[in-house]
Amino acid sequence: MGVFGLLTAEYLPASLLTPMAAELGVSKALAGQAVTVTAVVALFSGLLVPGLTRGIDRRRVLLCFSMLMIASNLLVAVSSNLTVLLLMRILLGIALGGFWSMAAAVAMRLVPASLLPRALSIIFSGIAVGTVVAVPLGSYLSGQYGWRTAFVAAAVVGVATLMFQWFTLPPLAPHRPARLRTVLEVLLRPGIAVGMLGCVLVHTGHFALFTYVRPFLEGSTGVGANGLALILLGFGAANFAGTLLAGRLLARRPRATLVAMPALIGIAALALVLLPASLAGQTVLVAIWGVAFGGVPVAWSNWVTRAVPDQAESAGGMVVASVQSAIAAGAATGGAIFGLGGANAVFVAGGALMLLAAAFIALRVRVDAVAPGMDARAPMHL
């Protein structure tokens, strides 16, 4: 529920870019920075919040994150200009980064070690469900009632999330203190930095594409708000299916799956630009993209928790920093490319980056990282 609520809020600007820019009197590229500012704040929040809250029950901290999410959505809904809107998105960034840094560590405490991969799959399925709900629902609500209504709806989702967590989470007294220095020590372990670079490349390419998916689809096929909502609903449903499929594929062929996911996204992005534009064809290609990205968060989070089981919160902060820096870089770079060459240029650049990421993972990223105290001869599976 926490992942679902936060991702619903984080992804909304991607489906509301056109009406937000029009009402606030700014360019689409500038409106897209609502994603960038959230990601930048989440980057620092993921690194700092676990340490700053190390003496506080984790249940209380997670509940506070949900309260920040609710406040952010409500204040964005009444923002009078882009500056105020961006400031309110800072609150979401604090909640987002803090939650992500603790999610895997909380899972490790709620279930036996043998069930951790399944628990992570359940937790990160919230990404797929959030994608199913946030993007198409945001597009539909903006077309019917205005883009501000979508953020009010996200606040309602936040209230439901808060209540769900209030009644289900047990007390979780903090265990091992998480400090920024520990994150740096984890990053210096063999194979970890290279793996995180692969993670950054994949997320940078994806979010450069995803932030500007609405302008691209509108420009290529002239699809309206309702048709766009259906296409993005297909993306979300495919994303959910990809999350479920990834668990089985990663258990059998971890390296091949890690390589195939960005490769498929890259091929789909380039095909969207290069093939003749048709509503049916683009719907299928967007669905392929959704399936491929479905397994990405599960794969990298599972990889890092297995590689660094002794520093779960610090490893979580490292993943948050990697992913959120990638989101910020993807949204910002995508905005710059969009301003210079339009949505087609964004999709060509993003697709090429995803293919580069696939090649890098195939050649350099290890799937057998070893944490201190573990037998280096024992294989480490995702």
Image (spheres, rainbow, N blue to C red):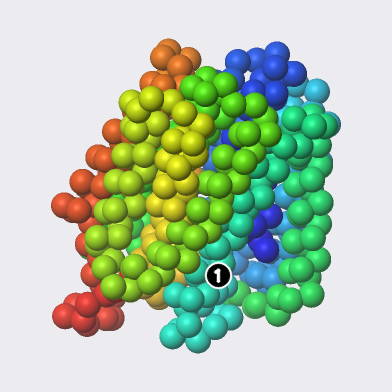
Q: Quadrant of the C terminus?
A: bottom left
Q: Quadrant of the N terminus?
A: bottom right
Image spot of residue 122 (x, y percent): 55, 70
Residue 227 seen in the figure: yes
Q: Relative to the observer, which residue lies in front, 165 or 358?
A: 358
Element class at badge 1? helix
Q: Relative to the observer, which residue lies in front, 244 or 154?
A: 244
Amino acid identity at mark 1: Ile
Residue shown at the point (39%, 60%) measured from the top left? 300
Image spot of residue 93 (x, y percent): 62, 44
Query: Viewed as shown, does residue 324 lie left or right of 261?
Result: right
Image spot of residue 118 (x, y percent): 48, 76
Residue shown at the point (79%, 60%) measured from the top left? 160
Q: Relative to the observer, which residue lies in front, 66 or 231?
A: 231
Query: Viewed as shown, does residue 143 lie left or right of 382?
Result: right
Image spot of residue 376 (x, y percent): 19, 78
Residue 12 seen in the figure: no
Q: Is residue 306 above or below residue 221?
A: below
Q: Name the residue under label 1.
A: 122
Residue shown at the point (47%, 66%) measured from the top left? 244
Crowd tier of the residue under label 1, counting other residues whose Cα lies within 10 Å: few below 14, some 14–19, many 20 or above: some
Residue shown at the point (28%, 66%) measured from the top left? 254
Q: In this view, does 139 lie above or below 32?
A: below
